[in-house]
Image (cartoon, rainbow, N blue to C red):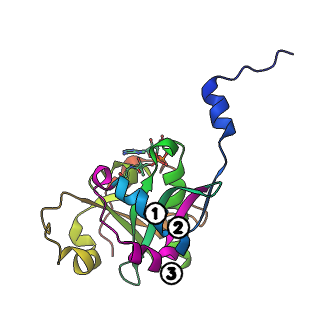
Amino acid sequence: MTPRSLSPVSLLRDASPPVQLRQGRTDDAEAVLRLITAHADEGHLLPRTLGELRARASRFVVADADGEVLACAELAPLSPQVAEVRSLVVTPEARGQGVARRMVAALAQRARRDGFDRVCAFAHDPMFFVQLGFSLVPHQWIPEKIAVDCAGCALFRQCGQSAVLRRLADCDAAWSGERPAAASALVLSHAS
Ligand SMILES: CC(C)(COP(=O)(O)OP(=O)(O)OC[C@H]1O[C@@H](n2cnc3c(N)ncnc32)[C@H](O)[C@@H]1OP(=O)(O)O)[C@@H](O)C(=O)NCCC(=O)NCCS
């Protein structure tokens, strides 16, 4: 049998260490800050400080490849019912491999376990979240965010961010972040 030939690209991929998701630790804070700072403009990300990232390290999920932090995302509680996915970044070299999808799914599972019933996010380009089954909603549907962050922000009412929301009851316990079967999930009915 002829051995299967491998392109240089697949050889490189095969040689890469596996990417594992884990909860953030205090000693990840510097790497997480570097990731967020390097992609702040691209992702219109909220600036973060090292002290804040250290204090909130356990809220994060990070993607770790042989000790190197390639990606991060935080689950920040806004109220007992609603938590926000924020500071979501994947280093360019690790994009397009489902890392962000897995991190958002991991945070949604954590939110569900912790008793939240909705997960939201705010993004300039919300289509990544829509792909994952989040719905575009008016900001007023997430008054917790307005009270916690927006009201005191200089860009209040002109920030250009779209709000997206996903009800956790709509995800099964082992939600993998797969695309919803129908695009009908695009806009939620305002039930609660
Ligand atoms: C957006 C970002 C987090 C995506 O990370 P990623 O690991 O490449 O995403 P995934 O590989 O998990 O993609 C999951 C799905 O979303 C899609 N997707 C990824 N980025 C997208 C985007 N910007 N817009 C629309 N869809 C997107 C992918 O095509 C994929 O869909 P598919 O499985 O049907 O092909 C990454 O590009 C990034 O860090 N950007 C800079 C910071 C940023 O914009 N953060 C988000 C702020 S809200």
Mark found first going from the N terminus, 1 or 3? 1
Between marks 2 and 1, how big is the CA–CA gap? 6 Å
User: Which residue is under mark 2?
Assistant: 28
Q: Name the amino acid type tagged 1.
A: Val
Q: CA distance from mark 2 to mark 3?
A: 26 Å
How packed mark 2 is, by other alpha carbons closer than 10 Å (few <14, some 14-19, many 20 or more), is: many
Magenta span contains residue 41: yes
Identify the residue position indicated by label 3 in the image: 115
Q: Residues within 10 Å of mark 3 (few under 14, many from 20)?
A: few
Location of the N terminus (image quadrant): top right
Residues at circles 2 and 1 in contact by the CB criterion of under 8 Å: yes
Q: Which residue in the rendered view is the most extreme toward the top? A: 2
User: In screen coordinates, is 132 left or right of 125?
Assistant: right
Q: Which residue in the protein does label 1 denote?
A: 32
Q: At 47% across and 51% down in the image, what residue appears?
A: 180
Mark 1, mark 3: which one is toward the viewer? 1
Q: Is residue 94 magenta?
A: no
Residue found at x 82% / y 15%? 2
Q: Earlier in the sequence, mark 2 or mark 3?
A: 2
Let me know if residue 143 appears in the view.
Answer: no
The range drawn in magenta is: 40-64
